[in-house]
């Protein structure tokens, strides 16, 4: 017979194991290491000895590569010993990391810097990944003619594609994501400096009419004076729901945010929100083209600050090309559309012949936007005395703001007590029994 002391020992052991399983998680994954000076062949040898879920730690130091790191194991983690401490330099034109078909991966804290031309950093071979893709806390420098991250042709991706807290500097493309199906895309809280083509380009997301959840939020995109780079954020032909919010885009860019086509795959009704972005560029702040050409949808543009100034007559704060579905809604509210005022560059221009709801915006002056009576079309509010940004016809700018929109302070404490895990309460029961019996 087991005495009371023995029973208490058993209960304590069970309690400890229960807590570990409930809150610590149990993992059989292995950790392996590579070291400064290892070339691609040596790193690939380590990869060949891993299984799904393993981690490879890149010890801090320099890795000069003349070959490609080939990842052919699912759910592998490539982790720098300290963030930015492992520095990887491709010394010849190559793909630095190539991820085979149907694989997910986590890349965390590595520093990649191209030495020669035409290097591409991380390339995904597509397919149907069996686990998430996460790229975080990493730095990409000097991939000037290629993509820092290219992911394309994911026929079925039921896991997240996440790119967060990275820095991209002097790259042709920062993040290029193309032809995804049925997944969530999150490109958030990154810094892009002087990416010459697109800082972010996502296109054809929602192939075959599948539903997507797209978040492009909190990114900081800059282009140096005189650079004349192309676009900060490009979103083309997406399905599902898209949020482009809280991004800051500044400098010598032809386009701050460029959206071309929602719902062209012909799926279910789509929705998009462009909110709380700060755009101050030398070109067009927002270029919104071919909206809802195939299926109906809803676009809400609000709480953005868009500053542009005259260079030529083609540039504007907001430009809307066309949207054709009568059941779609396109609404602009509480935006600050500012810069040079009066008869200089356009604040809002459109080629559409459908009235665009742009009521309740700030145009840079309490007198409202400048409305030239000589333009054909409607509406015509006869606002020749407007000292704000200029508008074309088919812009319904009535009830304009007489002061700029400012975000209200949030007085909430943000404190949350959380909810106890029921399993934890169950595990407390034997502990209470032990305490009582020990008295």
Image: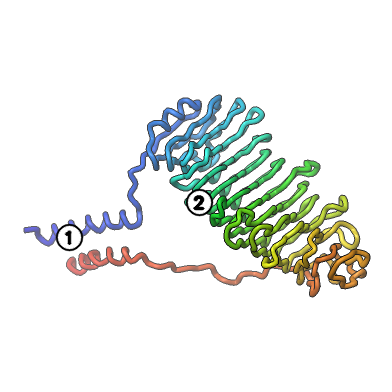
Q: How is the image coloured?
A: rainbow
| Quadrant in which residue 405 is drawn | bottom right
Check the image and report above or below for 200 versus 363.
above
Instruction: Mark yes or no: residue 417 visible.
Output: yes
Give the class, few, some or many, for how many residues have Cα within 10 Å of label 1's Cα (few <14, many ≥20). Answer: some
Check the image and report above or below for 270 versus 180.
below
Q: Secondary structure at mark 2?
A: loop
Residues at marks 2 and 1 touching, judged by CB atoms closer than 8 Å:
no
Q: Gap between marks 2 and 1, in whole Å?
A: 45 Å
Instruction: Mark yes or no: residue 186 visible.
Output: no
Which residue is depicted at the point 76% across and 71% down? Answer: 360
Give the class, few, some or many, for how many residues have Cα within 10 Å of label 2's Cα (few <14, many ≥20). Answer: some
62 or 163, which is in the foreground?
A: 163
Give the label on residue 160, or none: 2
Which residue is depicted at the point 83% across and 59% down? Answer: 339
x and y percentages locating residue 15 in the rendered image: 25, 58
Give the label on residue 286, or none: none
């Amino acid at each position: 017979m087991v005495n009371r002391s023995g029973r208490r020992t058993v209960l304590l052991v069970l309690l400890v194991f229960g807590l570990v399983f409930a809150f610590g998680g149990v993992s059989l994954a292995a950790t392996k290491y590579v070291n400064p000076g290892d070339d691609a062949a040596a790193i690939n040898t380590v990869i060949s000895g891993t299984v799904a879920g393993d981690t490879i730690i890149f010890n801090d130091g320099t890795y000069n590569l003349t070959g490609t790191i080939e990842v052919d194991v699912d759910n592998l983690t490539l982790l720098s010993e300290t963030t930015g401490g492992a520095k990887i330099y491709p010394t010849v034109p190559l793909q630095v990391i190539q991820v085979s078909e149907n694989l997910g991966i986590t890349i965390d804290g590595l520093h990649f810097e191209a030495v020669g031309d035409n290097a591409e950093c991380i390339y995904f071979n597509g397919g149907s990944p069996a686990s998430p893709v996460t790229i975080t806390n990493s730095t990409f420098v000097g991939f000037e003619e290629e993509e820092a991250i290219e992911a394309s042709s994911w026929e079925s991706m039921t896991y997240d594609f996440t790119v967060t807290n990275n820095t991209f500097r002097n790259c042709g493309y920062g993040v290029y994501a193309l032809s995804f199906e049925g997944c969530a895309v999150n490109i958030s809280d990154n810094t892009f400096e002087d990416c010459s083509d697109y800082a972010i380009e996502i296109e054809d997301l929602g192939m075959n009419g599948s539903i997507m959840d797209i978040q492009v939020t909190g990114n900081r995109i800059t282009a140096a004076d005189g650079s004349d780079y192309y676009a900060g954020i490009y979103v083309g032909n997406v399905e599902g729901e898209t949020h482009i919010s809280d991004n800051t885009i500044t400098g010598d860019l032809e386009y701050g945010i460029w959206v071309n086509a929602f719902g062209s795959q012909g799926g279910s009704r789509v929705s998009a929100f462009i909110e709380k972005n700060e755009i101050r560029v030398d070109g067009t702040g927002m270029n919104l083209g071919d909206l809802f050409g195939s299926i109906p949808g809803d676009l809400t543009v609000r709480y953005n600050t868009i500053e542009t100034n005259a260079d030529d007559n083609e540039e504007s704060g907001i430009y809307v090309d066309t949207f054709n579905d009568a059941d779609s809604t396109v609404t602009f509210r509480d935006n600050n559309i500012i810069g040079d005022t009066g008869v200089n560059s356009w604040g809002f221009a459109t080629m559409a012949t459908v009235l665009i709801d742009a009521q309740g915006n700030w145009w840079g002056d309490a007198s409202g936007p400048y409305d030239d009576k000589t333009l054909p079309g409607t509406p015509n509010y006869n606002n020749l005395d407007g000292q704000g940004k200029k508008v074309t016809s088919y812009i319904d700018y009535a009830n304009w703001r007489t002061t700029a929109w400012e975000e209200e302070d949030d007085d909430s404490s943000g404190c949350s007590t959380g909810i106890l895990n029921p399993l934890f309460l169950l595990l407390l029961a034997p502990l209470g029994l032990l305490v009582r019996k020990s008295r």
